[in-house]
């Protein structure tokens, strides 16, 4: 393995950490309805716990409304129950074969709680990025027959990649915080 391979592996690991954080941010509710809001809701169906998007289609026809259309009409009750029991604070209404999920406006207190959650998730992302850097530094030390200059240069490249990812994470946090605090 070469020094460049180690830096590439570190970049790939950091990219995965960023993508994971981005997905977690998408689930956090802001002022507008998004279908990804219900990604973590699990429905008791066919004897298993299944993600909502595997038993129904979710759409956002209006800014403050989600509609859930079960593929099997017999699952309407289970989907309704799963939505009510989720910690999202939703109150679904079943009309015929469609479940309407109106999103109540966020209170100032709830917005601040969500911002704290965003900061916690961002810190987990930063830790994952730093962990990838640490692992790569250990790998760099193990590579033999490399000059000190090359070793130092690879270490510098690794730090630059880390700094870029941390900066991008901070930008994502600022954007999500602005989105949540927007009234």
Image: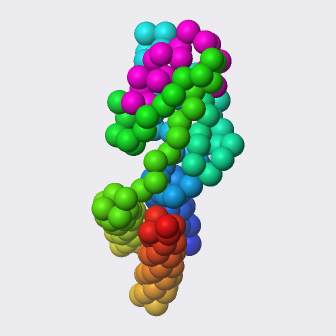
Asked whether 27 or 103 is in front, the reply is 103
Asked whether 111 or 155 is in front, the reply is 111
| 90 up-or-down from 14: above or below | above
- Residue 80 is one of the magenta-drawn residues: yes
**Residue at position x 47%, y 24% from top?**
80
Asked whether 94 or 56 is in front, the reply is 94
Q: Which residue of the protein is positioned furthest toward the right in this rendering?
A: 61
| 108 up-or-down from 3: above or below | above
| 89 up-or-down from 82: above or below | below
Residue 20, image x, y percentages: 48, 54
**Residue at position x 53%, y 36% from top?**
101
* Residue 163 visible to an observer of this rendering: yes
Q: Main secondary structure of the magenta part?
A: helix
- Tell me where residue 43 sits by quadrant: top left
**Residue at position x 48%, y 31% from top?**
92
With 138 as the anchor, is 97 left or right in this view?
right
**Residue at position x 57%, y 27% from top?**
99
| 155 up-or-down from 169: above or below | below
Residue 140, image x, y percentages: 41, 71
Asked whether 31 or 132 is in front, the reply is 31
Residue 89, image x, y percentages: 38, 41
Q: Give the colour scheme shown.
A: rainbow
- Residue 112 is one of the magenta-drawn residues: no
Q: How many marks?
A: 0
* Residue 120 visible to an observer of this rendering: no
Magenta part of the chain: 69-84
Residue 91, image x, y percentages: 43, 34
């Amino acid at each position: 393995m070469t020094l460049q391979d180690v830096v590439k592996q570190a970049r790939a690991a950091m990219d995965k950490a960023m993508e994971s954080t981005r997905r977690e941010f998408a689930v956090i509710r802001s002022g507008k309805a998004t279908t990804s809001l219900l990604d973590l809701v699990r429905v008791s169906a066919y004897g298993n716990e299944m993600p909502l998007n595997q038993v129904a289609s979710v759409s956002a026809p209006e800014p403050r409304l989600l509609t859930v259309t079960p593929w099997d009409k017999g699952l309407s009750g289970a989907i309704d129950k799963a939505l009510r029991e989720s910690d999202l604070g939703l109150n679904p209404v079943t009309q015929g074969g469609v479940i309407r999920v109106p999103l109540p406006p966020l209170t100032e207190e709830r917005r601040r709680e969500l911002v704290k959650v965003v900061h916690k998730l961002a810190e987990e992302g930063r830790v994952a990025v730093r962990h990838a850097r640490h692992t790569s530094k250990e790998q760099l030390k193990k590579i033999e027959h490399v000059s000190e200059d090359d070793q130092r240069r690879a270490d510098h490249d690794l730090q630059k990649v880390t700094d870029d990812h941390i900066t991008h994470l901070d930008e994502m946090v600022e954007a999500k915080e602005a989105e949540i605090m927007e009234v």
